[in-house]
Image (cartoon, helix red, strand yellow):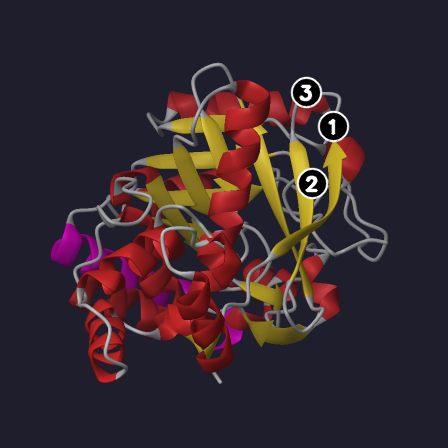
Amino acid sequence: MQNIRHLSYNDIEHHFLQIGEKKFRAKQVWEWLWQKHAHSFDEMTNLSKELRQKLATQFTLPALQTDITQYSEDGTIKCRFKAYDNQKVEGVLIPTDERKTACVSSQVGCSMGCTFCATGYMGGIRNLTFDEIYDEVVLINQQSEKIYQQKLTNIVFMGMGEPLLNYKNLLKAIERISAEDGLFMSPRRITVSTVGIAKMIKKLGDDKVRFKLALSLHAANDKKRSEIMPINESNNIKALTEALNYFYQQTGNEITFEYILFKNFNDTQKDADELVKLYRQIPIDLVNIIEYNPIDKAPFQKPDEAVTENFMKYLESKKVNARLRRSRGKDIDAACGQLANKG
């Protein structure tokens, strides 16, 4: 049986006409699926019981379910969600006074193999469908409303997986999230983070997407970047520079660099200088300098506070728009690079 959320509005309308029902039933069902977030046909109470039973025999309506919820001392909330096939994926609610941000996943596991990231050690398991990604956002938004009495203000695709390897589902999920008959969230409040797949970054430009883009850089020279991110062997910094400039020319959208500081690896003034030079080759809006969060399987450590401070001061002296992003949710393995379905 087909997943009803994989049908278009016109498909659903056509189906109702075929079974002798009025066209307006499609609008009712569409609202239940995308605005009222029904997870079963039984919830569609403005349909007759007979019609609900008929739909249940004709279509499936799989939805993510919250499996485990963990609460950090700093207010961060991590959820493990369970899919119809028992695969599990994690998402995080990151609250501040000004923002309520959902950090969502695009895949179960990740095939990119970045040596500092817990998700990378899981390997790639499968893509999330667009409706599963949508469910993540809905469930995290419900948490935000319940606990903080505020809707989500931002969404970042910085959870498990490489979003650009799940391109069609990513774009379809964002279309539903930003649609007036969906969650109606501005794409300008959505950021997609990638390890850097040059041809797909160019495709984002060709498709004139409206969301922001973040590049997980973490080293501004090819030798170091290839050591920690295997993708750099086939998508080097020169190729990424060209792709990001193309993306900006086509869309005008904001681009961010993400740069995790690793002790005695990429935290010297020389590293900072290489970062400055790269920053000046691309219209970068912001450089996020990120605290490293240790994981069991990786040898990296966080630099001393003085080293981090000096790195930031050097960037500031070179007129780089940089911000130090402090880790959130470390005590529940919810911080950057820690998502791995523990337990």
The CA distance from mark 3 to mark 1 is 27 Å
Please name the residue shown 25% across and 75% down the image: 16
The CA distance from mark 3 to mark 2 is 25 Å
The CA distance from mark 2 to mark 1 is 8 Å
Q: Nearer the viewer, mark 3 or mark 1?
A: 1
Q: What stretch is highlighted in magenta?
A: 232-251
Q: How crowded is mark 2: few (under 14 residues within 10 Å), some or many (20 or more)?
A: many
Work out whether residue 221 can be spotted.
Answer: no
Q: Is residue 104 above or below residue 25?
A: above
Which label belongs to residue 334? 2
Q: Is residue 161 left or right of residue 182?
A: right
Whether label 3 touches label 1, CB < 8 Å: no
Residue type at numbered disc 2: Ala
Residue under label 1: 72
Residue type at numbered disc 3: Ala
Work out whether residue 88 can be spotted.
Answer: yes
Q: How crowded is mark 3: few (under 14 residues within 10 Å), some or many (20 or more)?
A: few
Residue under label 3: 306
